[in-house]
Image (tube, rainbow, N blue to C red):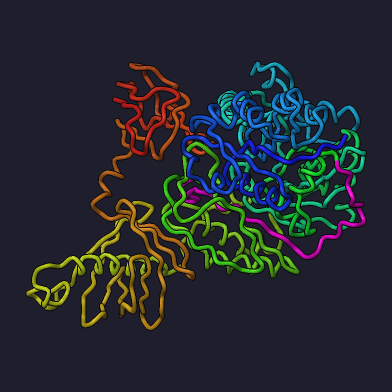
């Protein structure tokens, strides 16, 4: 039955909320958003027609709180709720509650969602009809020993997965039996934290696999088509960071077989919305196996939108209000090639540790071939409570080669300063021969991490010169005495000024420089000499000539950290020496401090407990990612200084070991 949607409550936040608002505006639909304490000033709140406070910063208090969301929806009498992705997007209980309250849930029918929103139920259902899938096991019991027994039968390595949700949360690879129990508990805990449920399943882990998915679109009149595939193999922590279409590994016959398989699953489910069937493709056997159906809008949906020139959010809304699909399979004709990169607030050089804080500078050039999906501006605050996704960058062109080249150029131009992020890491991936040739699997990042994190040869010195001239300029402007003397004047004319900075690996670099005349300097760094001229400078831009080459640097200072970006050399972070003793004390053999702002989600020891080196002590969560503080020596717990469910700032003292 067709029902007109005039208003939509978006039960989400950030980038996806902004994306849905844009389509609502184009369709003439009122957009209503919800916000937590820390999201009050977020851009998506400003863009929406209406915005309502939902609760505290923890997802359980706000974006996962079904009763509060429904209460607001009923109060303002919305026609529909769009869950976006993540949070409650695949929560059957939420969909049923919407149905009960006569609110349209923008997603598939509850019956298909109920089967597919649980990976374990999906496996059991599709196995009965002969869909080929990776050997695995799932059941209602949470008894570890039952799963351990089945893991032996399946054979290691295996992967533990959260039964509900996606995004790489609640996943662990187990290579040997002795690690099983600890990783099983970790997966359960992370799943509970991300999705409100700790059910998991296990599967045989395919060590040389690729992740490929097929986009489906259906309506309530049994019409169903596919919108071709996306390849999402480049991942870290089981979470995608690069998506592309068409897949560089599929030929026409494999593509048809995979798309036909997805259609058969969709028809079996009477699928009537936007959804994605995910597969693991074995590089060795060239066979593919069913993984799961995502009954929601995917993060990477713009890849398909750019390829087929359709608004998937619009089509999803139309299907939800009972509109008949006016497209046939022959109407879908992909043109060219599309690639998406996920820009994350994280440090790839430090095990992808999430980063939080305020973005101090954000320059995103407008280019015809680039689409940016983000909720950021140069003043945005990145909180610790949610996923660290900052933006999605999508480039489309006639060919894969041209799209990669254009993406590379855009990444060179884009500037983001103030937090750690993976911009340079993404750019490095695009330049790798194996990536360019499409020769990779889901282990690609793990196997190439060292080379992907390596510095550009000769890049350190220009950044050090930039930093020292930035500081020199500030000091010179503050001079009140003896202004007539040259900068850095010494009784001994031949004596140079000395300065030093701390690199991201905590190595100190000391070097000399001398003011010559006007804005000219001589630098001596790491046994190399440089003739330098300061061409121009402002608060955030330094232009210098170094050995007859011009360099433009964007630079900002934040709590004694210097964040610097050069189009050619990328991003660099330096720490001024006077702060280094504090940062260096973040952890030692008797004192442990939180490395970043975090939530304490598990305390695994008690006061006076004897411990061994490498024993897990405290589990922290930041941006939905878990990290475990482990003991650096044998000893005894002298004191525990935090409690579970406590939010802590960076460098907060957690525990003492003696």
Which residue is rendered at x = 20% and y = 69% of the image? 476
Q: Quadrant of the N terminus?
A: top right
Q: Answer above or below: position of 215 versus 438.
A: above
Position of residue 364 in the picture relative to residue 25 (left or right): left
Instruction: Say which quarter of the image contains residue 186.
Output: top right
Which residue is rendered at x = 65% and y = 30% of the image? 73
Instruction: Say which quarter of the image contains residue 520.
Output: bottom left
Q: Answer above or below: position of 538 versus 200.
A: below
| Residue 75 placement (x, y as % from top left) | 63, 28
| Residue 127 placement (x, y as % from top left) | 86, 29
Position of residue 220 in the picture relative to residue 100 (left or right): right
Instruction: Say which quarter of the image contains residue 431.
Output: bottom right
Check if residue 472 falls in the magenta segment.
Answer: no
Which residue is rendered at x = 75% and y = 55% of the image? 305
Which residue is rendered at x = 15% and y = 67% of the image? 479
> Which stretch appears magenta?
323-351
Q: For this rendering, which residue is in front, 286 or 112?
A: 112
Q: For this rendering, which residue is in front, 315 or 328?
A: 315
Check if residue 328 falls in the magenta segment.
Answer: yes
* Any part of residue 477 in sight: yes
| Residue 278 placement (x, y as % from top left) | 77, 42
| Residue 87 placement (x, y as % from top left) | 62, 34
Q: Quadrant of the C terminus?
A: top left
């Amino acid at each position: 039955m067709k029902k007109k949607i005039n208003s939509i409550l978006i039960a989400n936040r950030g980038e996806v909320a902004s994306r849905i608002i844009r389509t609502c505006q184009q369709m003439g639909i009122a957009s209503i958003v919800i916000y937590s304490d820390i999201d009050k000033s977020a851009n998506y709140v400003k863009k929406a027609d209406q915005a309502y406070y939902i609760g505290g910063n923890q997802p359980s208090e706000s974006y996962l709180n079904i009763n509060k969301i429904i209460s607001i929806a009923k109060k303002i009498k919305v026609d529909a709720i769009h869950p976006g992705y993540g949070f409650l997007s695949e929560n059957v209980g939420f969909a049923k509650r919407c149905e009960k309250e006569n609110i349209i849930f923008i997603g598939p029918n509850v019956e298909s969602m109920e089967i597919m929103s649980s990976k374990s139920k999906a496996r059991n259902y599709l196995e009965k009809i002969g869909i080929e899938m990776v050997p695995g096991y799932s059941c209602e019991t949470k008894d570890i020993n039952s799963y351990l027994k089945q893991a032996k039968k399946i054979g290691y390595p295996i992967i533990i997965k959260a039964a509900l949700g996606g995004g790489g949360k609640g996943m662990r690879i187990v290579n040997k039996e002795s690690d099983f129990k600890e990783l099983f508990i970790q997966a359960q805990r992370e799943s509970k934290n991300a999705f409100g449920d700790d059910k998991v399943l296990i599967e045989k882990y395919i060590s040389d696999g690729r992740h490929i998915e097929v986009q489906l679109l259906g309506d309530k009149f049994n019409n169903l088509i596919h919108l071709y595939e996306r390849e999402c193999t480049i991942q870290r922590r089981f979470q995608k960071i690069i998506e592309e279409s068409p897949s560089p590994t599929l030929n026409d016959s494999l593509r048809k077989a995979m798309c036909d398989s997805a259609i058969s699953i969709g028809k079996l489910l009477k699928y009537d919305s936007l959804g994605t069937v995910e597969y693991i493709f074995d590089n060795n056997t060239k066979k593919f196996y069913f993984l799961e159906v995502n009954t929601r809008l995917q993060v990477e949906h713009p890849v398909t939108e750019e390829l087929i020139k359709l608004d998937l959010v619009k089509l999803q809304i139309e299907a939800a209000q009972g509109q008949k699909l006016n497209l046939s399979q022959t109407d879908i004709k992909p043109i060219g090639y599309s690639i998406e990169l996920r820009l994350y607030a994280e440090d790839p050089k430090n095990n992808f540790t999430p980063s939080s804080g305020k973005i101090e500078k954000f320059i995103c050039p407008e280019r015809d071939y680039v689409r940016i999906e983000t909720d950021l501006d140069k003043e945005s605050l990145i909180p610790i409570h949610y996923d660290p996704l900052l933006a999605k960058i999508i480039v489309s062109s006639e060919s894969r080669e041209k799209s990669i080249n254009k993406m590379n150029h855009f990444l060179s131009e884009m500037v983001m300063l103030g937090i750690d992020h993976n911009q340079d890491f993404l750019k490095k991936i695009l330049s790798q021969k194996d990536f360019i040739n499409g020769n990779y699997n889901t282990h690609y990042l793990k196997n190439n991490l060292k080379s992907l994190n390596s510095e550009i040869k000769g890049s350190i010195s220009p950044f050090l010169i930039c930093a020292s001239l930035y500081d020199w300029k500030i000091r010179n402007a503050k001079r009140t005495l003896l202004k007539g003397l040259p900068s850095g004047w010494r009784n001994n004319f031949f004596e140079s000024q000395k300065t030093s900075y701390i690199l991201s690996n905590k190595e100190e670099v000391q070097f000399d420089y001398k003011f010559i005349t006007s804005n000219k300097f001589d630098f001596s760094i790491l046994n190399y000499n440089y003739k330098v001229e300061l061409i121009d400078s402002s608060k955030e831009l330094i232009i210098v000539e170094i050995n007859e080459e011009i360099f433009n640097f964007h630079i900002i200072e934040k709590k004694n950290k210097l964040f610097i970006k050069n189009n050619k050399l990328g991003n660099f972070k330096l720490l001024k020496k006077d702060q280094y003793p504090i940062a260096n004390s973040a952890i030692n053999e008797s004192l442990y401090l939180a490395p970043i702002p975090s939530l304490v989600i598990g305390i695994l020891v008690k006061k006076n407990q004897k411990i061994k080196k490498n024993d897990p002590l405290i589990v922290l969560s930041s941006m939905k990612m878990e990290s475990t503080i482990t003991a650096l020596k044998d000893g005894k717990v002298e004191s525990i200084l935090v409690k579970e469910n406590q939010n802590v700032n960076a460098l907060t003292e957690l525990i003492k070991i003696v």
